[in-house]
Amino acid sequence: MKKILLALVLGALAAGSAVPAMAKDAKKIRIASEGAFAPWNGMDSSGKLVGFEIDLAWDLCKRIEADCELIAMDWDGMIPSLQQGKIDAIMAGMTITDERKKVIAFAGPYGTEQSTFATLKSSKLAGAGVGAERVDLADEAAAKPAVAKLAELLKGKTVGVQTSTIQVDFLEKYLPDVTVRNYDKIDNAAIDLAAGRVDAIFGDRSPVEALMRAAGTDKMTLFGPAMTRGVLGEGMGVGLRKADAELKGRLDMAIADANKDGTIATLSQKHFGYDVSVR
Amino acid sequence: MLDLLTTGLHGWGPQLLSGTAMTIAVALSSFLLGLAFGAAAGAAKLSDSLVLRGLAELYTTAVRGVPELLVIYLLFFGGSGMIMAVAGIFGYGGLIELNAFSIGVAAVGLISGAYSTEVIRGAVKSVPYGQIEAARACGMGRWRILRRVLVPQTLRFALPGLGNVWQLTLKDTALISVTALAEIMRVAHTAAGSTRQSFLFYSVAALLYLALTTVSTTAFQQAERYASRGVRRA
Amino acid sequence: MNWTLMWDSLPRLLAALPLTLQLVAMALAFGAVLAFATALLRLSGNRVAVALTSAYTFIFRGTPLLVQIFLIYYGLSQIDLIRDSVLWPVLSQPMWCAILALALNTGAYTSEILRGAIETVPQGQVEAARACGMSRVRLFRRIVLPMAIRQMLPAYGNEVILMVKASSLASTITMMEITGVARRMIAQTFAVFEIFIVAGILYLLINFVATRLIKHAEWRMTPYLRARA
């Protein structure tokens, strides 16, 4: 019986090891993006990644003379995958925040984005009192009245957000009376807004605006202030493992170059229609 | 039908077809891996060693009692580290990296194996002991008994149970869509998101799964009939 | 292994336990009603009823639960007819969508278990009851059903465990039950193992208790199998 057992165990191990073990190509940098966050990153119907960050990724790779591969991946699996070594970099509209800096490093930022709310045009929230002013959360005192107004307006309402984003952090910190619904993608939050399942969605401005132009979610409108900084972070960066300091150095230089020679501004005009680069 | 798939469905037809191929590939690989796990754990459960029995019991209880989704997340988020630790025990210190396919297969295989274990163990036990004694009396060696007496009969007894495990495995592959592997469910999810045609694409996905389960049910019925061709019927 | 983190994650995961239990309990309750009706219709011999119930069990047993949940949550909400109907207040809630999907799923499996159990009731018992002058309804209520339920309990126990596990899929449609909270906490702490181990243990405990309850029910229902004092 022991021999049988041994054979079976060995057989199982052989079958197990035959499946995985993909050797790593030493030079190739695997960059993950989401493909559901247009215009930062999106996906065409052949399943190919497209968008501002995709073009920028290829440009940066050329600058650091690296061989790159772009991988589509779910948003909330990215940081664990980076830590696990399944990917080497993240370019997926990921904002540089203190929380994330505890676990990974960032090169950049290469772009900035405001966070904003959207609701249906028919909703009472649409015309509500909050003006579309800009609020800098880093300036606590100045931001306070705007945030208080928002809290009053949204009290008891349900807001859809993409899970594990800076927007969730914002809601948890400033708007405790709001019911938060976490979605895997911002698209699905918008679909549920259109279906009337949530009262509002909260996300990065340009993807929300892109959704306002898309079929099925075109009855949305923005409301409330456009917010930046503080808990909402310091702009989008390339997520990297902390151990890859050398790669971070090269990418920081490449981003600075791309900023200086106007590449980021040009790409930004192409995808957003305005400039998202960090000055 | 094929025409509709390639040109219709808002251009997502080809992707759905390749997604179906991917689902079949993942399901087959996981099922085979599960059989290996199942055979190993089944043998461990039948062994005299208390440690082996305990380990196998732990494996089946834990995997069958914890949601599949959780097992898949665990392997997806923590898989490489875990495999490397296991490889380290066997003296392999290199870097092992898993792609979405192998993670998916490992996760579903692990789940499938826990269910196969019980099926295989039950099937082995249902081979009458007298047959083994008879084989011994004929002077057969251990390996020959295993090959000629135990395995063929175990397979026959195990087939109906393994058919169920296969169906389970096939349906569990839908859960690995969370690892972004482009199988049926993933393609349907992406297509539904980008075209806003959720109802259409999830219905198509459901039909594809129905086709797969129906075909495999028939296949298993054929296999059962073939395996029991030597058995007298009442 | 970070033991403090595991300990700290426990309160938040425990807070999600009631939602998981609620999902499972509601799904099992509605599923049982559905299974009962389906099994009876299936055994009724009425051709239309048999065809309909066969189609129902075939579809729900032949497709992954994830597809069913997405079809009900995202698929139905896309149809204007449903959004304007009286069903919408119910279907607009992710909670009810999850319960509906889980109940339909377990209903299909349980109806097959129940049907199988009813078919194993010995013909002699039915004949004896008829000979005693029992009506069809009384015969079913007093003889067939109690025997069938006893017969199906072990298989039903497995189904309960499958439902506990299946409730984790509600996290894919924004429900913050145990798995949903676990995933959220992973995103905050990136401590994959610690949190999944705690969540896994919670599920094992639920399943352990569920198994004990079913075993107890089995014991209660089979007094004649116990040794007499």
Image (tube, helix red, strand yellow):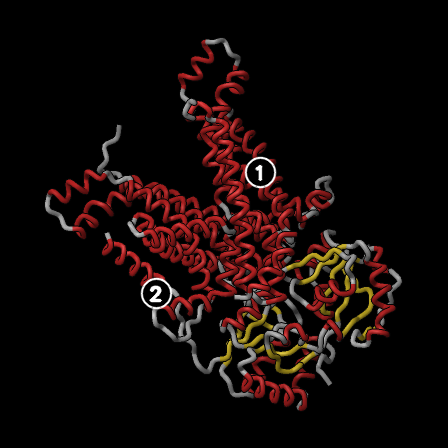
Answer with left or right where residue B223 lies relative to residue A152: left
The image quadrant of residue A35 is bottom right
Q: What residue is shown with label 1?
A: C28
Of A207 and C204, nearer the camera is C204
Q: What residue is shown with label 2?
A: A18
Crowding near the residue tagged with mark 1, few <14, some 14–19, many ≥20 C-alpha atoms within 10 Å:
many
* Amino acid at the residue labelled 1: Leu
* Chain to which the residue tagged by mark 2 belongs: A
Q: Is residue C56 visible?
A: no
Of A97 and A76, nearer the camera is A97
**The C terminus of chain C sits in image quarter:** top left
Crowding near the residue tagged with mark 2, few <14, some 14–19, many ≥20 C-alpha atoms within 10 Å:
few
Discs 1 and 2 share one subunit: no
Local SS, label 1: helix
User: Residue A87 appears at what percent x and percent y?
Assistant: 51, 73
* Amino acid at the residue labelled 2: Ala
Local SS, label 2: helix
* Chain to which the residue tagged by mark 1 belongs: C
What is the number of callouts on the image? 2
Pair 1/2: label in front: 1
Q: Is C13 located above or below residue A90 in the figure?
A: above
Residue at point 29% right, 42% down? B125
Q: Is residue C87 visible?
A: yes
Q: How far apart are labels 1 and 2 at the CA level?
A: 41 Å
Of C76 and B99, nearer the camera is B99
Answer with left or right where residue C50 lies relative to residue A153: left
Q: Is A70 located above or below residue B208 in the figure?
A: below
User: Residue C23 appears at what percent x and percent y?
Assistant: 62, 44
Residue at point 29% right, 61% down? A10
Residue at point 37% right, 68% down? B89
User: Residue A84 appears at what percent x and percent y?
Assistant: 50, 71
User: Residue A15 appears at what percent x and percent y?
Assistant: 33, 61
